Amino acid sequence: QLVDGWHDKRIAVMRSVVTAKFDQHEHLRAKLIATGDAVLVEGNQWRDTFWGVCNGTGANWLGKILMDLRASYTTQR
């Protein structure tokens, strides 16, 4: 069963998890920063159109979180 209000909390939770991952791994952070201004898309074939994009359709929330985090790291430099 999902936590009450999960659909309202999931983006914040994913943002926290992704931030922790890149904060703890400098080599991954450097790779993220090295993507420059590229649009990051979580492409998939398993029809996840919330976190990613499948067959050209999707909200791409994971890509948006990664691009926001990259911008944050870039401005901190």
Image (tube, rainbow, N blue to C red):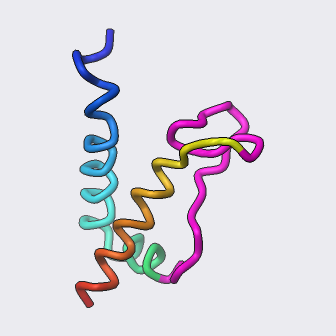
Name the outermost residue toward the bottom. 77
Q: Give percent across and percent down for residue 56.
A: 74, 47
Q: Give percent across and percent down for residue 33.
A: 43, 80
Q: Tell me the residue at 66%/49% (across/down).
A: 43
Residue 10: image quadrant is: top left
Residue 46 left/right relative to 1: right
Q: Tell me the residue at 34%/54% (across/down).
A: 18
Q: Give percent across and percent down for residue 73.
A: 30, 78
Residue 73 left/right relative to 56: left
In front here: 56 or 17?
A: 56
Q: Which secondary structure type mostly characterizes the magenta part of the structure?
A: loop
Q: Give percent across and percent down for residue 63.
A: 50, 56
Name the outermost residue toward the top. 1
Q: Tell me the residue at 32%/65% (across/down).
A: 22
* Vertical order, 71 against 1 (above or below): below
The answer to if 43 sits in the magenta stretch is yes
Q: Tell me the residue at 32%/68% (across/down).
A: 25
* Vertical order, 32 against 58 (above or below): below
The answer to if 6 sits in the magenta stretch is no
> Magenta residues?
34-56
Image quadrant holding the C terminus, namely: bottom left
Residue 27 left/right relative to 8: right
Image quadrant holding the N terminus, namely: top left
* Vertical order, 69 against 43 (above or below): below
Name the outermost residue toward the right. 55
